[in-house]
Amino acid sequence: MKKIILIFYICTTAMRLQGMQQIVNIGGQSGWKDVSAMEGVTPHPGKKAYPDMVLQGSRYRVDKDTDLLIHFDSGINDATDRYGTDPGTIRISRRFTAMGRGSGIFTNDGQGIQLIPKKDSYFAPGNTGDSFSMEFWLNPAYAADNEEIISFRSSRKNRKDQIVPQEVTCYIEGRKLKWSFKNFFFDPVKFTSSVTLEGQDSIIPDEWHHHMLVFHSSNGLLEYYMDNKLEGITYATASGTDDNAPLVPVIGTIIQGRFHLGKNFTGFMDELRIEKKIVKNPVLSEFQNDSGSFTTTLFDMGRGGSELEKIHVDADIPDNTAVRSYYRVYTNFKQTLESPPPWMPFIPGTFITKMNTGRFFEIRLKMYANGTGTLSPEIHSIQAVYDKNLPPLAPLSLKAVPGNGSVTLYWKNIGEADIQGYLIYYGTKSGVYFNDDAQEGASPIPVSGGSYTLHGLTNGTLYYFAVAAFDKAGASFPGAFSKEISIRPGIN
């Protein structure tokens, strides 16, 4: 029987020397619920059926001045709900995009996309407009003459009460983008107007470029930009110059005006936006904020002295992007509030050996876009592996020898490598160890091990004793108690 117990003790001790390996999963199937802080990053539908952590895109969001916003990510929808949409036969491309996760595919079908302005939109019938900006990304397949990119058509009356067409058209001619405004700006003298504007640089097929039109109502200035480079200017004034007599956009009321997008255009369009203000700094890259980070919550390893062993990071890291990985381990909860340790860098998948022992840990990943701001790392999941520090076993063979006002205790030391010492508990009631009459101090008394004598005890009083070991977790976290023994000092 003793042999069986000894074998069990040896096997249990060997197993405990290796600790109890635990695994924490973040992301992937487990989701990102254990992320406590995010800056410039966001979960996004990933390639492996679960959300990935990516840099937060810089693309536009609806604000108080946004009149129209179509992302082309999952359909043809105006995010402002100021325009009704008829997508026709237009499909979404996931492969060729300027920003986001999709773009509109146009095939010169004579239909394109129709947008119907609602009453609170800039292009609503009867609206008298102020400054505005219109911008979009374009990737033409051919850049052929007379390909119509955007048009708005309505009608109103001239000074003779005759109905005249009202048109705003953006089209390609001679490999250049041109803008035409017919009766869009109201001339109080002529009642009709015609303004044209064209770019200088050629439109190149199979390349994405950003295009933006800006109207300044204060002086009638019209500007056209490609990739934020000024391509052309003109004035919507009676003289066509800066004469301090700007014409005002007035939307016709005879018929319901409509936009047509890509009616006879072949290629891709992305991120169409109209703002009721002058846009000065358009977003030209998906990840214009070129870095971001996220931090996990605190993970409890269960007991002080546990060791963070290894952290795996499953990620796609495109060329010229980067991910930097950090961890920190806290000794106790108080340290998390008062004096956090420094963040320690680590290489995913390798063993961690520095400042990795304690009770709690957290992980931080910093992500960097490529130089052009077009690509982001994609973090699929994180897996942390740690060895939980198990409490020490109970000391065996506790014995006591009485003396005059003293008791000497003997026990077998525990064969665990991380044992730091032992605690002697004593008291005058079984299982209640709160006495303080020993000269060596109040219960429990920390000692190095093997044997120890307590002095100053009262002869004839029955004392109860137990011993527990403590490891690198510290004396505040002792292991299991030995078997309790009792004895009276001064009586042999």
Image (cartoon, rainbow, N blue to C red):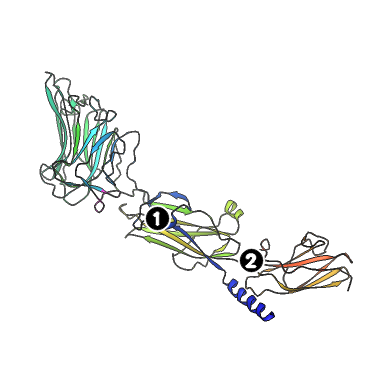
| x then y, percent, for residue 243 | 20, 25
Residue situated furthest bottom in the rendering? 3
Considering only vertical position in the picture, is 215 above or below 395? Answer: above
Instruction: Give the residue furthest to the top.
Output: 160
**Placement of 259 over or under 324, stated as above or below:** above
Q: In which quarter of the image is residue 376?
A: bottom left
Q: Up-down: is 281 above or below 440?
A: above
List the residue tagged with mark 2. Answer: 391
Residue 375: say if magenta: no
Res 263 quadrant in image: top left
The amino acid sitting under disc 2 is Pro
Q: Is residue 472 left or right of residue 397?
A: left
Answer few, some or many: residues within 10 Å of disc 1's Cα (few below 14, many 20 plus, some between 14 and 19). Answer: many
Q: Nearer the viewer, residue 41 or 428?
A: 428
Label drawn at residue 367: 1
Q: Nearer the viewer, residue 21 or 206?
A: 21
- For label 2, count other residues whose C-alpha is less than 10 Å away and answer few (under 14), some (14-19) or many (20+): many
User: Disc 1 marks which amino acid?
Assistant: Met
Magenta-colored span: 93-102
